[in-house]
Image (cartoon, rainbow, N blue to C red):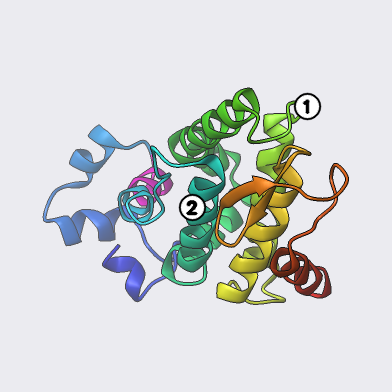
């Protein structure tokens, strides 16, 4: 992570990592198969600690907090590093495989557990497909990260979280404020929360 403060992933080498760590290249290769796997593990230690999935609270609140922390992190150093990892992976499929196996699948399993539990308890729609729901949660974030056409900022985090949580909610419940749930006063599926509706409109406008 120290090397990546002043260099891109493409510029960092195994030799540089070994030199910075004060060990030989053989020591690095004893624990990691490639430069990308070293970088991904370093990223995970830094990133996962800053984007936890809270426990013992509602799924709405847990996902709301998680999305806000993820967008904040991806708007800075973590986001730049992920973009470089994904860019490297376009020319080297092993990098994408390492990213999926070391980071993506583990994070996906945690989020899936929250969504499936919320579906069972009635907090989220019972007919949700967890894989599709996760793609909906994360795709806009990665799109802004890679295209860089709009910012990954708090306004986006507020709007995206409100929009997604209303879409995921069971027809008899809706998101209020930051993750709380109340019975909907209108017809099933109707958004009767002014703040969430306004956030959704801002989100659609970009």
The kind of secondary structure the magenta stretch mainly shows is helix
Query: Can residue 153 be seen at all in this image of the molecule?
Result: no
Picture residue at 59% right of the left edge, 66% below the top: 157
User: Looking at the picture, how far across and down is residue 56, in whole percent?
Assistant: 39, 37
Left or right position of 138 against 16: right
Q: Nearer the viewer, residue 48 or 91?
A: 48
Question: Which of the marked residues, 2 or 1, is nearer the chain's N terminus?
Answer: 2
Quarter holding residue 201:
bottom right
For the N terminus, give its image quadrant: bottom left
Asked if the magenta segment contains residue 55, the reply would be: no
Does residue 9 lie above or below 23 as drawn? below
Secondary structure of the residue carrying tag 1 is loop
Q: Give the magenta part as a residue range.
A: 34-41
Taking the view exactly as shown, the residue that stands out farthest to the front is 185
For the C terminus, give its image quadrant: bottom right
Quarter holding residue 142:
bottom right
Q: Nearer the viewer, residue 162 or 27?
A: 162
In this figure, which residue is indicated by the disc labeled 2?
66
In this figure, which residue is indicated by the disc labeled 1?
127
User: Looking at the picture, how far across and down is residue 174, in whole percent?
Assistant: 70, 49
Quarter holding residue 135:
top right
Tell me the CA gap for discs 2 and 1: 23 Å
Q: Nearer the viewer, residue 48 or 67?
A: 67
What is the number of the mark on residue 143?
A: none
Q: Nearer the viewer, residue 4 or 67?
A: 67
Number of marks in picture = 2
Taking the view exactly as shown, the residue that stands out farthest to the top is 120
Q: Mark 2 Cα within 10 Å, few/some/many (few <14, many 20+)?
A: some
User: Looking at the picture, how far across and down is residue 160, in whole percent?
Assistant: 67, 61
């Amino acid at each position: 992570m120290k090397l990546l403060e002043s260099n891109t992933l493409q510029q960092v080498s195994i030799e540089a990592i070994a030199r910075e760590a004060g060990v030989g290249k053989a020591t690095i290769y004893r624990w990691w198969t490639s430069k990308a796997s070293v970088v991904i593990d370093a990223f995970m230690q830094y990133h996962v600690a800053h984007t936890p999935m809270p426990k013992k609270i509602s799924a709405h609140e847990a996902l709301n907090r998680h999305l806000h922390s993820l967008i904040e992190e991806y708007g800075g150093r973590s986001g730049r590093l992920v973009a470089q990892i994904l860019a490297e992976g376009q020319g080297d499929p092993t990098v994408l495989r390492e990213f999926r196996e070391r980071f993506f699948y583990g994070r996906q399993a945690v989020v899936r557990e929250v969504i499936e539990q919320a579906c069972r308890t009635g907090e989220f729609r019972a007919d949700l497909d967890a894989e599709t729901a996760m793609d909906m949660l994360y795709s806009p974030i990665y799109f802004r990260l890679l295209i860089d056409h709009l910012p990954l900022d708090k306004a986006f985090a507020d709007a995206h979280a409100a929009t997604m949580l209303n879409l995921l909610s069971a027809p008899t419940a809706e998101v209020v404020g930051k993750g709380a749930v109340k019975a909907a006063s209108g017809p099933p599926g109707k958004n009767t929360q002014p703040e969430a509706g306004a956030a959704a409109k801002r989100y659609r406008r970009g």
